Image (tube, rainbow, N blue to C red):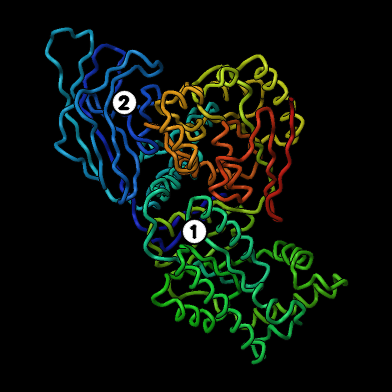
Amino acid sequence: MGGSSSRSPSISHASVGGQLYVSLKMEYFKIGDELIPHVFGSVPIIGSWDPARARRMERESASMWELSFVVPPNHETLHFLFLLKPDERDVPFVVEEGPDRLLTRGNLEGDARPAVFRPPELGDKAIPEYKVFMKVDVVSPFDLAASWRAYQENLRPSTVRGIPDISINVASEGGHEAMPAATGAVVAAAVADQMHGPKEDRRLAIVLVGLPARGKTFTAAKLTRYLQWLGHETKHFNVGKYRRLKHGSNQPADFFRGDNPEGMEARNEVAALAMEDMLSWMQGGGQVGIFDATNSSRQRRNMLMKMSEGNCKIIFLETICNDELIIERNIRLKIQQSPDYEEETDFEAGLRDFKERLANYDKVYDPVDEGSYIKMIDMVSGQGGQIQINNISGYLPGRIVFFLVNTHLTPRPILLTRHGESQDNVRGRIGGDSVLSETGDLYSEKLAKFVEERLKSERTASIWTSTLQRTIMTATPIVELPKIQWRALDEINAGVCDGMAYEEIKRNMPEEYESRKKDKLRYRYPRGESYLDVIQRLEPVIIELERQRAPVVVISHQAVLRALYAYFADRPLKEIPHIEVPLHTVIEIQMGVTGVQEKRYKLMD
């Protein structure tokens, strides 16, 4: 499947495993003027057990309402119920009678019973019953992505509804809301991975291919960080490190000639050592190995494929760049940063040597056309380019493709901050949707001045908040920049503990308190979320942040910002619940060619 634009890379030769596209429908005639069908249930896929956050069904016809979402084929059992409520208010609402409805692996357990509601205003009248329908289709992530791309580029409603749960307060031309491009694709390819569930049985090796200075190591490091953040056991194996350990770091360009048998033998030997280490690591529980080397000859790749037989699946990831300015920039960075040239005091001599080494690789370079592969062609600038894929299947390879589609090297800052102090912060209560305190109002003013000064030359910047009023209020004084509200940025759902203080939980729910204390990462509040659930729903936000070329200010909540910060700072999952994200502090993440750098600004004591 293919498609391209001036901004979006094209994708060709797609063969990626599908997800389950679920459509829930209810035949419903309104009772009165205000009550509208909603669905609430287990998070994060259906929505929330909180009626105030129930997911609204959309009218398909005069009497039929629908809600659609995407789940993996092996999803956990989802518990949900229908309810009727006004669009904007929490009450009154009416929950259907009967036990939870259960959805397991795309199948509705038990009969698709009618939805029975007992609104108070009916009194002793007959209770209405409404027919319920459910349809499950296997849909390719690329089809879903194309649908959202059509929505954005053509400003037409997508045929796939209800996937990105966001609202935007700045209309585009024609009065239509613009959707972040990556959201639908990410949800289709990735929302479904239950990180607390079983891993993929098959181990995966991503084998880099490409000439030097084409961004292989940069791509490998970003992909490693992304997969580790999602909970996949991933490790980066850099063959250059093995070569330097065994043969030293001062090898001349002749060492890399294709007609130098000693050099060829030495380089193949260290590649085999690195591959053996990776396979051994996989046998010990590793899931995804990133094998980073030029691997530019078919002979080398055949050797790696033979070694991997019966041990792991190989996907070749080839990076191709035809932009001479970018290549020259990367070469100069290589001379400055590579351990191969740390003892070379003459920069120009190092430059000549590296270009000679590159020419030696170029003479024997065989582009990949065998096996399973992903080709990234002129993608590093973030301005168009193309991705070609061949023989790729499964949701994990699919989500890797979508990550690569949206990553680029354009330098830009991302500013992370919690909302200003809220009334619930003052009272020591978790969750809720309270307004700001006087101190919080003061922070919102200081933040506006800081953002205006820091981003005064960045007219394309944007402000992202959650849908909770304390973040929206914090963003209000920031003018002239578009504001986007993401439900994915809402604070961790505390379920039945919402609005309680930790001392109350300790006193009234001691078992829950101790369970959370033992494992904050995996602990899930009753009818609420865990940190792993938060990470899962944040993935579309991460992909969209990677895709952005302009600065973004994210105003969110402690647990959410811990998870976002951990991604950029490459922190292990186990550390996420303990990362310090204080109030009234801005964390600036600078993304660019040389990696990720951080600054902190404390705007108030």
Q: Position of residue 482 (x, y in %)?
A: 60, 29
Q: How many labels does the image show?
A: 2
x then y, percent, for residue 303: 50, 82
Identify the residue at horizontal 50%, vertical 20% (top origin).
Answer: 433
**Viewer-nearest of labels 2 and 1?**
1
Whether residue 94 is visible? yes
Q: What element carries label 2?
A: strand
- Tag on residue 424? none
Q: Is residue 500 left or right of residue 576?
A: left
Q: Mark 1 points at which residue?
A: 233
Q: Report the residue at 70% width, 76% height from top.
A: 244
Q: Which of 390 and 468 is in front in this view?
A: 468
Quadrant hosting residue 358: bottom right
> Along the horizontal axis of the image, is 531 left or right of 394?
right
Q: Quadrant of residue 290?
A: bottom right
Q: Name the residue under label 2.
A: 38
Q: Nearer the viewer, residue 295 or 468?
A: 468
Residue 559 in the figure: left or right of residue 513: right
Residue 6 appears in the rendering: no
Amino acid under disc 1: Glu
- Taking the view exactly as shown, the residue that stands out farthest to the left is 126
**177 over 241 or under it: above or below:** above
N-terminal-most mark, 2 or 1: 2
Q: Name the element at disc 1.
A: loop
Q: At label 2, which amino acid type do we have?
A: His
Q: Relative to 305, is 179 above or below?
A: above
Q: Mark 2, residues whose alpha carbon is within 10 Å: few (<14), some, or many (≥20)?
A: many
Residue 151: image location, x then y, percent: 44, 40
Residue 31 at x, y = what percent? 23, 14
The quadrant holding residue 359 is bottom right
Name the residue rendered at 37%, 19% in the picture: 87
Where, quadrant-wise, is the C terminus in this rendering?
A: top right
